[in-house]
Image (tube, grey):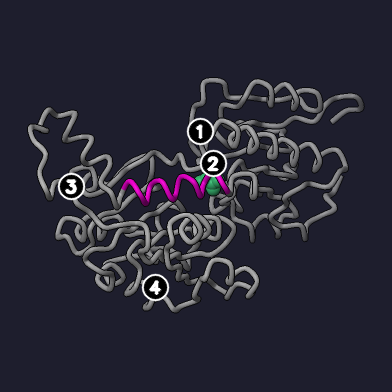
Amino acid sequence: MSAGMKPAVLVARAMYPETLARLQQHFEVEANPDDEVFSPVALSARLVGKVGAITTGSERIDAAVLAAHPQLRVVANMAVGYNNLDIAAFDAAGVLATNTPDVLTETTADFGFALMMATARRITESENYLRAGRWTQWRYDMFTGPDVHGATLGILGMGRIGQAIARRGALGFGMKVIYTNRSRLAPELEAPLGARYVDKATLLREADHLVLVLPYSASSHHAIGAAELAQMKPTATLTNVARGGIVDDAALAVALAERRIAAAGLDVFEGEPAVNPALLDLPNVVLTPHIASASERTRRAMADLAADNLIAALTGGRPLTPVNPGVLPLRA
Ligand code: GLV
């Protein structure tokens, strides 16, 4: 880069115009106004000469991409999850990764709770029935489902979002909260929720409504498969607002079809945006297109935080939410 030239960055997907304008004050920005989801080859072509990039879960950056673009210094992911980034490869290459935690916690918890409630109380299933013109009379057992209030809320992955969902359940709906996590919460976090730390077998056996809020990694791949579904109550619901691949979608479709659990709510899917066709045919599953963080204000906050991270990392400041701060300070 010659003196006076702005560093070049890629914004890999469509972006708020205000965020792009702010980035353009610091950088030569290649944007993607058509919002094409780049193939790995197309993404690599766009990264030529770029020192930074804003990505989303759709862009995979691994050792091969980093090796092909040694000038790349920071990737700011516009998501709290970063399983699309190979962090070990980032560490090895001395490249910074950032994510967007905290700003989406409450919005995502709202949606997780809403999806769990819609699943338990059969909201989309009954709406489809009404829209299809099939509602001809009230009936005593029409669309009965399990209660939410007072039920046992099971949470797998008790991080920031898990705790925010637990708070809604415990304080708003009088739910008993049990959870499984890599580590037990501090007593001052557990106590106000009345949350009980249990092993996974207990969680599966006791939860009336099981909500998944854990990061995706090799160790959480198919954390819920046929064997786990078989341990759940036949009246239980399962809600996934974490990542596709944590649930074995094919096994879930079988369990739902055979009513081995009552219902599921899914915002994320294996191989999304493709959805396992077996799920599409089932009445007892609520399906949404990966929108848990999608409030207007939160999506803007995520875009702003990704931009702030990129600007700070490339202008000598301190990125706010680094994933691998061990690589700081970045080479010039
Ligand atoms: C969305 O899935 C995120 O990780 O923020």
Asked where in the image residue 32 lies, by quadrant, the reply is top right
What is the chief secondary structure element of the magenta stretch? helix
Whether ligand 1 has any atom under 8 Å from the Cβ at mark 4 is answered as no
Residue 70: x, y in percent? 72, 45
Which quadrant holds the C terminus? Answer: top right
- Identity of the residue furthest to the left in this view: 136
Viewer-proximal residue among 306 and 12: 306
Q: CA distance from mark 2 to mark 3?
A: 41 Å
Q: Which residue is mark 1?
A: 38
Amino acid type, residue under disc 2 in the picture: Glu
Residue 29: x, y in percent? 71, 25
Q: Secondary structure at mark 3?
A: loop
In the picture, the disc for residue 143 is 3
The residue segment tinted magenta is 106-118
Amino acid type, residue under disc 1 in the picture: Phe
- Taking the image as shown, residue 279 lies to the left or right of residue 46, namely left
